[in-house]
Image: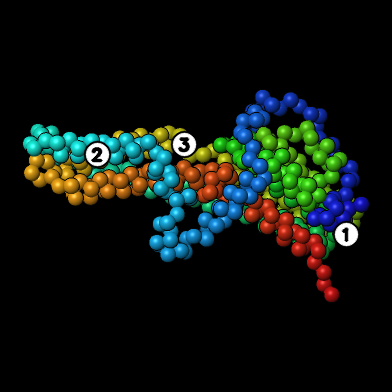
Amino acid sequence: MSSNIFASGCSAGLLPRSAPPQARSDERRQNGVIKKDSGSQEDLSFQDLTSIEKERRQLLLRSELPFWRILSYYRGTSLRAVVSDSLVWTTLLIYVWIRWRANTIDYVPAAVAMMEKTNVNILGGFLSFFLVLFVNQTNDRFLEMYGFSKACSGRIQDIAGVAKTQLPYEVADRLVCHFNAAHIAGYVGLNAIGQGSPYSKSNFFDHYNAKHHLLTKNEMKILSHHDMDNSGLCMKELITWCQLDVAQARKDGLIDAHQEKSMHDKILQFRAAMDGMYDYTDQPPHFFYIHFLVLLSALYLPLFAIDTAYAAGWGFDKAIGLDILQGLIVFLQCVFVVGLRSLATNMIDPYGDDLEDLSVINYVEGTLEICSTIMNARQE
């Protein structure tokens, strides 16, 4: 007998059995269904995930702070990427070494006149163009995947609303249970593709399943042949369960053909949004493009440091104040190049454990809370 989705769990009715279990550990499938061996990534605990999520949500609120408060932060900023990048330190060391050399001699080397004929700014202009283009492309990709995540949540809410008003409570509760389970399993399955995901069956799915009683022990046993941590197949089967629940409701005369079609459309829209997340994660920007930008950066920044250092003055024209000012310009150029490149690469995979990634826990818990409100709605 079914009770509230957020109280005692779904009913334990028999569900269609899946195909016989198959050995999938070494299998590689199209669309990134299975790509990694188990244990390829150390799991974070649920407490670790919630801690990251809390800081991530706080980070989103800093955008409207005064500039002096924004500059006081280090985590979640470009400075963290700049400080940890060896190319930045190499560039600064080149500049410091040349200026140290300039301050230890009293003559002007012949190389100074030769450096005046070079034009590093042309390379800098091309690099700036490609970096800004790369950031725009990855930002569009990031926002598209954000849209997929919110679309998944929206379709679950749509089904919950229709089920609450059109189906008996136990049938509606069972359907919403399966749909929320598919939602969570979908994020866990992302670990199979791309750079992997910090969300696993043990630290993510099992937590919400135990808390909200989404699936019964019998249903978990039926799904046990799927490797949820390294496959999107569990999510696919749970979505099919939702469709079977709707089809059974139609056969039982609980809904008409029009309502059945509408609910199937919502379920398929959810699956399409999930597939979009998997497709984008499976196909990041071309490595050729990223390598091209890294190569340009690795060539340009040292050349810029050399050009700036030679232009800072030699012989009787040198001055410590000018050396410091030019050094600051070199550092700012490093911040621009490395910062933009790091920003773009961080947005490629928004389902990781970076502070800049999407708030998956917020989406899941928000959806569960809204479904609870819908399922418990009462009209006097």
Q: Residues within 10 Å of mark 3 (few under 14, many from 20)?
A: few
Residue 257, percent from left and from top: 82, 56
Q: Is residue 14 above or below residue 375?
A: above
Please tell me the numbered disc located at residue 286.
3
N-term-proximal mark, 1 vs 2:
2
N-term-proximal mark, 2 vs 3:
2
| Residue hosting label 1 | 168
Question: What is the three-letter code of the residue carrying label 2?
Answer: Val
User: Viewer-proximal residue, 272 or 210?
Assistant: 210
Q: Residue furthest front?
A: 104
Residue 97, percent from left and from top: 23, 35
Quote the CA–CA distance across marks 1 and 3. 50 Å
Question: What is the three-letter code of the residue carrying label 3?
Answer: His
Quadrant position of residue 86: top left
Q: Residues within 10 Å of mark 2 (few under 14, many from 20)?
A: some
Q: How is the image coloured?
A: rainbow
N-term-proximal mark, 1 vs 3:
1
User: Viewer-proximal residue, 128 or 57?
Assistant: 57
